[in-house]
Amino acid sequence: MNRKIKKNVMTCCIYILLVIILIITLFPLFWGISASLRDNSELFQYVTPFSLNTFVPLKMTIESYIGLFTDYNFLQPILNTLYVTIMSIVLGCVVNSVAAFAFAMFDFKFKNVIFMLILLSFMIPFEAIALPLYQVADGFGMVDTHAGMIVPCIASGLVLFLFVQFFKDIPPSLLEAGRIDGANLAQVFFRIMIPLSKPIFITAGLMIFMDQWNSYLWPLLIARSKDIRTIQISLTAFQTEHATDWSSLYAASILSALIPLALFFPFQKYFVQGITSSGVKG
């Protein structure tokens, strides 16, 4: 009996701890949503003392969300970011999957050395290569273009690694059967490998999407004109030298967070499946 009581007490303590962690985690989100539905004059009025009005606006309004599109033309950065991320996903999945197919299925000279160098590439902080990368992009005339934001992010060592690990787990007998039936390498890749690799393609696509959607430093360097700026750079438009439009800033921040969340949750199952099936194998 005492053992059962101890087990119940332990379970209750775990649940209480999880609830506390959940509250701490969601507090900034609740505060941001509440602040985006307030007027600027009411925004900091109920921060202290802590009360129900800290989270529930007295005068709820969506003027800050309307103002994003009427006063700040926030639709353009959203469309720019969607274009950059979609193109990066398509090109990134194609390039990295084809390269991973070569690494996983063929033996060639210096294969392990090249693969090791690629793995080392995603361990290097982006800040360390930002300026040399900018000089290369400037030399190719890609500064202040969408291509300048897309091309450097197509090849990814981490995404390539996930593809390689997944492809290694596909039975070679399937590929050999395709070759015996007369299929060339392209047909083997598109008709056998890709249909079997749905989870890892979704995982790679989500990783590229999140990386591009949240990217700040590189778009800040490469995008000079307002017409091609992405959503993260455009968040600075609400801050001026003398004032900050806090309600609109919170509304833009919440909107920029909800879009990737709306994409992530429907594919969460495939994302987890892709990560777990791409674990480190011998």
Image (tube, rainbow, N blue to C red):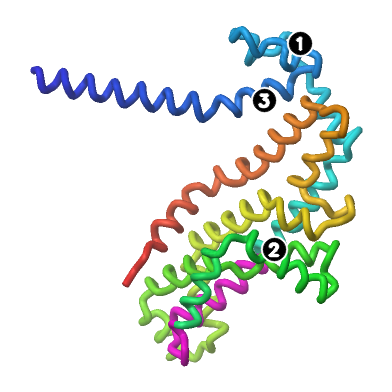
Position above or below: 85 against 38? below
Q: Visible in this render: residue 268? A: yes
Q: Residues within 10 Å of mark 3 (few under 14, many from 20)?
A: some
Q: Is residue 108 left or right of residue 237?
A: left
Q: Secondary structure at mark 1?
A: loop
Relative height, residue 15 to residue 274 (above, below): above
Is 162 drawn above or below residue 19 in the view shown? below
Count of labels in the image: 3
* The residue positioned farthest toward the left in the image shown: 1
Instruction: Sort mark 1 into few (<14), some (14-19) or many (20+) by Cα contacts within 10 Å.
Output: few
Q: Position of residue 134 (x, y in %)?
A: 76, 67
Q: Which mark is residue 33?
A: 3
Q: Are marks 3 and 2 in contact (CB under 8 Å)?
A: no
Q: Which mark is residue 59?
A: 1
**Percent x, y for residue 36?**
73, 24
Q: Dividing the image into 4 quarters, which one contains the C terminus?
A: bottom left
Q: To which residue does mark 2 refer?
A: 130
Q: Residue at x 56, y 77 (%)?
A: 98
Say above or below: 65 vs 8: below
At x 86% / y 36%, what residue is drawn? 69
For the record, the magenta segment spans: 90-112
Q: Label 3 vs label 2: CA separation?
A: 34 Å
Identify the amino acid type marked 3: Ile
Q: Amino acid at mark 2?
A: Ala
Mark 3 and mark 1 lie on one chain; the one further toward the N terminus is 3
Front tag of 1 and 2: 2
